[in-house]
Amino acid sequence: MSRSSLPPSQSSSNTELDDLLSALTDALLTDGEIDQLADELLAHTNAPRREVEGLVHVLQRLHGALLVVQPSHRFTRRLKQDILGVPEENVVMRFRQLPTRVQLATGIALLAGFLFVRRRRAVDDDALRDTKEVTALLQ
């Protein structure tokens, strides 16, 4: 049942109860103690005492059970990216934004460099092995 379809007296009672619970929750978060405040607020409202006391008990148990946790830097960064739609700036993302010709040229240059280094090591290994064999034969 929505608040607009409630009778005016019940709607204002729910509003008073909402305001009361909001004030109690704020007080609990700042001070940690709400029993005395609940009694003071109940004296000024028409909210049913038994219902409010039950809700105060629930608020206190929730406050004791729920711990304050700081989110990790990684989580906050990813959440911000998800909400704002900002892509993550890293090497791979920057590479993907380059034109296709540049990506292809970069790939070929990397492959050629890798093959050059690999061949150089193989040639150096063969020359070292030959030098060791010659030294062993000469002795």
Image (cartoon, rainbow, N blue to C red):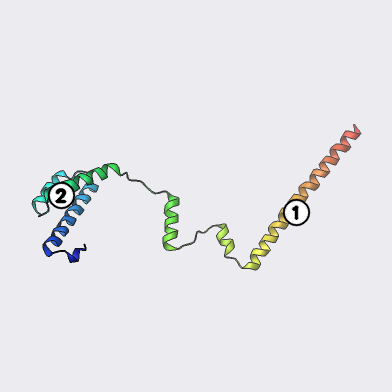
Taking 139 as reference, is 15 left or right? left
Q: Where's residue 99, x and y in %? A: 61, 68
Q: Is residue 31 visible?
A: no
Q: Where's residue 130, x and y in %? A: 85, 41
Residue identifier under label 2: 51
Taking 29 as reference, is 71 left or right? right
Mark number, residue 80: none
Whether residue 13 is situated above or below residue 125 in the rendered picture: below
Cα–Cα gap, marks 1 and 2: 80 Å
User: Mark 1 is on which residue type?
Assistant: Phe
Q: Where's residue 105, x and y in %? A: 68, 64
Q: Where's residue 101, x and y in %? A: 65, 68
| Secondary element type, mark 1 | helix
Q: Would you call the spot at circle 1 few (<14 residues within 10 Å), some (14-19), or many (20 or more)?
A: few
Taking 56 as reference, is 77 left or right? right
Mark found first going from the N terminus, 1 or 2: 2
Kindly identify the residue that appears in the image at 87 percent across and 37 percent down: 133
Quadrant of the snapshot with the C terminus? top right
Kindly identify the residue that appears in the image at 22 percent across and 50 percent down: 25
Whether residue 32 is situated above or below residue 88 in the rendered picture: above
Kindly identify the residue that appears in the image at 26 percent across and 45 percent down: 62
Number of numbered callouts drawn: 2
Taking 110 as reference, is 55 left or right? left
Front residue of 43/128: it is: 43
Q: Is residue 76 visible?
A: yes
Residue identifier under label 1: 116
**From the viewer's perspective, is the residue at label 1 or at label 2 nearer?**
2
Front residue of 87/63: it is: 63
Q: Would you call the spot at circle 2 few (<14 residues within 10 Å), some (14-19), or many (20 or more)?
A: few
Kindly identify the residue that appears in the image at 43 percent across and 50 percent down: 73
